[in-house]
Amino acid sequence: MDNNNLPPETIEIGVHWYEDEDGKIVFDVEEMQREFEWKLKKITKNLVMVTNKEVFDKGEVIEHYPCDVNQNKEIESNGSVENIVEYQGKKYYIITDWENNVRWGEEEATEV
């Protein structure tokens, strides 16, 4: 295959195989998967989504204020805490309850 004809968003991996004791060709799918995941991780290291929980747990809270939203995303006086959290050189807006439990922990974190 001519590599010059591949679209720029293409990830190339080798076809890993070996010959077993019976002389049959065996494709090493696990090795191909590892190679693909490694290459994907290399190009997406700055593009991977981070969750609210990951940012709050691993980042540093630099500001926090009471806010009027509850766990159901409804208006409630002092229902939560707004946090500005710095993580991996970026700032994120994370909402927690008053005991620092992250609201909507598995959702994508919102950059400030």
Image: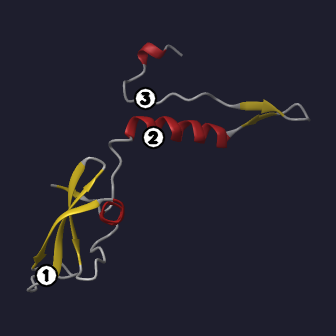
The residue under label 1 is 74
The three-letter code of the residue at mark 1 reads: Glu
Front residue of this view, candidates 101 and 36? 101
Residue farthest right in this picture = 22
Which residue sits at x=68%, y=31%? 16
Q: Tell me the element at label 2.
A: helix
Secondary structure at numbered mark 3: loop
Cα distance, mark 2 to mark 1?
37 Å
Q: Which comes sooner in the sequence, label 1 or label 3?
A: 3
The percent position of residue 18, horizontal first and vertical second, equals 78, 31
Residue 75's place in the image compared with 106, above or below, is below
Q: Residues within 10 Å of mark 1 (few under 14, many from 20)?
A: few
Residue drawn at point x = 51 percent, y = 27 percent: 12
Q: Nearer the viewer, mark 3 or mark 2?
A: 2
Task: Give the residue number, with chain letter if any, for mark 2.
Answer: 41
Looking at the picture, does residue 33 appear above or below residue 92?
A: above
Q: Quadrant of residue 97?
A: bottom left
The part of the image, by quadrant, that contains residue 13 is top right
Q: Earlier in the sequence, mark 2 or mark 1?
A: 2
> Along the polypeptide, which appears first: circle 3 or circle 2?
3
Amino acid under disc 3: Thr
Do labels 1 and 3 touch, CB within 8 Å? no
Q: Secondary structure at mark 1?
A: loop
| Residue that badge 3 annotates | 10
Q: Is residue 37 left or right of residue 15?
A: left
Q: Nearer the viewer, residue 51 or 67?
A: 67
**Render colour scheme:** secondary structure
Measured in 3D between alpha carbons, the distance from the residue under mark 3 to the one under mark 2, in whole angstroms, is 14 Å
Counting every numbered tag in the picture gives: 3
Query: Which residue: 21% across, 81% down?
Result: 72
> What amino acid type should be assigned to the residue bearing mark 2?
Lys
